[in-house]
Image (tube, helix red, strand yellow):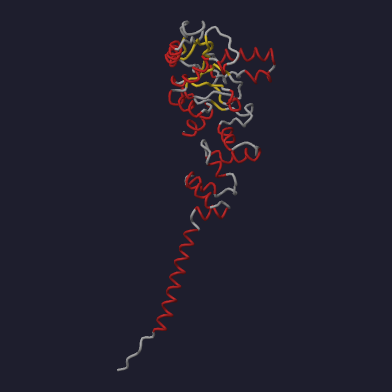
Amino acid sequence: MVVRKFNYYRFFIVLIILIVIIFGITSFIKDKNYKKTYEYKLTNIGYSIEDVNKIEKELSSNQIDKILTMKYYDNLVDLISEKYFIFDYLEEYINYKNENKKKSNAEIVKMVNTKSYLDWFDNQYETDITKNELMLVNRYYGLSEDYEPDDIVDVPTQYAYSGKKISKSILDKIISLINAGKQEGFTFVVSDGYRSYKEQENIYNNYVDSYGMSQTDEIVARPGHSEYQTGLSFDLKPYNQVIEDVSTNSEYLWLKDNAYKYGFIFRFEKEHESVTQFPSSSWRLRYVGDSAASLIYSEKISFEEYYAFFVENNN
């Protein structure tokens, strides 16, 4: 019998070939799988690994898929990091930013979310009255001519100037706020309240007759676009006072720190004029409910910003 010697050399060669084949197949599979990842696809567009980590953290897979259909945008990560960023408006953010490069990302997001960058003459939307106390009425969102709350009541004269009306749903809240102020030595009265569409139309037309439409549109809401028509908006002023500087007025300062506790917000503050597109109105309050009022107060945002992110964006 012939005993053959084991050929270690041949075995070694075969083993090396098998290892190379296995390594090659593994690398091919790994490479193929890697090319399916967002990291590969996003870096291939131009985003850094750090950018990719942020994008994957902030956005859903569907949103990232949308990003992959777009050109590389060097401001993307900064935009999506903004607190009130809404993905559906991404392309509008980009377009507006390209036209306004000096504006901050926070300003870009705010203006686009609230539609305040649009010409309100050409962009009109119907107010969603199903939102109840969170319905939005402004330059863009309007109520129909026949909209009228079914619970409008007179405000008792001990809390208002004669003839002022408001939605019954918030009357107790107003009275509670006025009484709380009285305990601090302040006397507040409702100086303006509910107006019908027709009443606002008459006021608007009278201003137009006196000042012209262009000047009127700067200071008076067009009919259907006044929050007074909701029955949820009113003016609450110190009784029988002429106040020149509200910033140092004790009644105003107290109201600023307490109105939200009763579900009210200051509707037209000076710092939000770019959004509301109305001149500031120091004593104008609006009922939005306790939760919304607390958040708007703590975040120091306008009602338009709240509505865009927490109401409209959550549909």
Give the residue displayed 50% in from the left and 26% down from the top. Answer: 128
In this view, the residue farthest toward the left is 1
In this view, the residue farthest toward the bottom is 1
The spot of residue 98 in percent (x, y) is 64, 40
Which quarter of the rendering shows the N terminus?
Answer: bottom left
User: Seen in the image, is 31 located left or right of residue 108?
Assistant: left
Give the residue displayed 52% in from the left and 31% down from the top. Answer: 308
The spot of residue 230 in percent (x, y) is 51, 18
User: Seen in the image, is 278 located left or right of residue 64?
Assistant: right
Quick one: 255 or 33, which is closer to the camera?
A: 255
Answer above or below: position of 40 versus 86: below
The spot of residue 288 in percent (x, y) is 47, 23
Quick one: 147 or 33, which is closer to the camera?
A: 33
Quick one: 61 or 20, which is closer to the camera?
A: 20
User: Seen in the image, is 166 located left or right of residue 200?
Assistant: left
Total numbered labels placed on residues in the image: 0
Q: Quadrant of residue 206?
A: top right
The spot of residue 33 in percent (x, y) is 47, 59
Q: Quadrant of residue 276?
A: top right
Quick one: 224 or 274, which is closer to the camera?
A: 274
